[in-house]
């Protein structure tokens, strides 16, 4: 059982970055896993639209709807009433700035999320400004953005070329300037994630982005070894050697805090 105080707000997340304390984040889709994760000391719960794949059995996150995201966010909130909860905005729910504000408001008002997450770069700047100005905290997501899988042509590492890396850094700075308070970096070279993290005042949360991000996130089903089929190379199965789900969740938190996860093997 974890005895540290739960993260309640963005100020605390920013303070963690400033004092170099790593932020442990995991996805959660239901009340039970949310409660177990909170008890294990997970700092931030992300209701990811990855639920489309691991809960619904879809091929991608594209079919997930806003109503489904609200339903799962409500369940997570009930299971972990004290936790900092981020809800993913699903595919096409933020295609225009006005849609973004209306749909983010539903995730906050009905789902009781504290923050919403959107995937993308410069095209999101107006929407992010609108959200931030209206008091809705924003997490953005760069690198491999799964909702664009059909355009990206598969789940591939992003930012390997100098031009792509520069674009990600430029986008990250612009997103921060527009009002984003957190940035997820997915499947990018560790050196790029380190550079982005060093250049931002907002925390970065990595997934397949090396150990130098300010925090880490994994899909909870992946890190418990529950995912059928392909498991990405950046995932570690924390159930191995543990006797309970709670012990595996605590091992993940410790590994993130002590920077033993991700290792070079789990990075690009
Ligand atoms: O949907 C999700 O679970 C995510 C994380 C993998 C970052 O966006």
Image (cartoon, grey):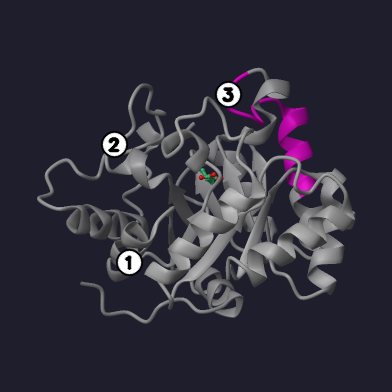
> Which of the two discs, 3 and 1, labels the residue nearer the N terminus?
1
Is the residue marked 3 within 8 Å of ligand 1, measured from its CB?
no
Q: How many marks?
A: 3
- Local packing at callout 2 (Cα closer than 10 Å; few below 14, some 14-19, many 20+) is few
Q: Residue furthest top?
A: 153
Q: Is residue 267 left or right of residue 170?
A: left
Percent from the top left, x then y, of residue 16? 50, 72
Q: Which residue is mark 3?
A: 156
Q: Which residue is mark 1?
A: 35
Which mark's residue is nearer the viewer, 3 or 1? 1
Percent from the top left, x then y, of residue 100? 80, 55
Q: Say if residue 139 shows up in the picture.
A: yes
Where is residue 38, by image quadrant? bottom left
User: Which numbered dot is residue 228?
Assistant: none
Q: Secondary structure at mark 2?
A: loop
Decide: is 163 above or below 108. above
- State the extent of the magenta-drawn residues as a range: 154-171
Residue shown at 32% from the left, 42% from the top: 223
Is the residue marked 2 within 8 Å of ligand 1, measured from its CB?
no
| Pointers 2 and 3 in contact (C-beta within 8 Å) | no
Q: Secondary structure at mark 3?
A: loop
User: Which numbered dot is residue 226?
Assistant: 2
Percent from the top left, x then y, of residue 232? 41, 29
Residue shown at 44% from the left, 63% from the top: 76
Q: Secondary structure at mark 1?
A: helix
C-alpha span from label 2 to label 1: 18 Å
């Amino acid at each position: 059982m974890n005895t540290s105080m739960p993260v309640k707000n963005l100020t605390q997340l920013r303070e963690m970055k400033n004092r170099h304390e790593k932020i442990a984040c995991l996805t959660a889709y239901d009340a039970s896993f949310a409660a177990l994760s909170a008890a294990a000391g997970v700092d931030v719960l992300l209701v990811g639209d990855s639920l489309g794949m691991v809960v619904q059995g879809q091929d991608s996150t594209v079919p997930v709807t806003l109503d489904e995201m609200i339903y799962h966010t409500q369940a997570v909130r009930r299971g972990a009433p004290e936790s900092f909860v981020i809800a993913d905005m699903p595919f096409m729910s933020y295609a225009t700035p006005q849609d973004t504000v209306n749909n983010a408001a539903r995730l906050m008002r009905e789902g009781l999320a504290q923050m919403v997450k959107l995937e993308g770069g410069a095209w999101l700047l107006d929407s992010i400004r609108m959200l931030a100005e209206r008091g809705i905290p924003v997490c953005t997501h760069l690198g491999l953005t799964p909702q664009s899988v059909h355009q990206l042509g598969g789940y591939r590492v992003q930012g390997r070329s100098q031009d792509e890396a520069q674009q990600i850094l430029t986008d990250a700075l612009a997103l921060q300037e527009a009002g984003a308070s957190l940035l997820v970096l997915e499947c990018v070279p560790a050196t790029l994630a380190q550079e982005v993290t060093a250049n931002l005042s907002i925390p970065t949360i990595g997934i397949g982005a090396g150990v130098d991000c300010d925090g880490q996130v994994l899909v909870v089903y992946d890190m418990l070894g529950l995912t059928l089929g392909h498991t990405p190379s950046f995932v570690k199965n924390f159930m191995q050697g543990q006797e309970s789900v709670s012990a595996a969740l605590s091992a993940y938190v410790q590994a993130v805090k002590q920077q033993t996860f991700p290792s070079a093997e789990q990075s690009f």
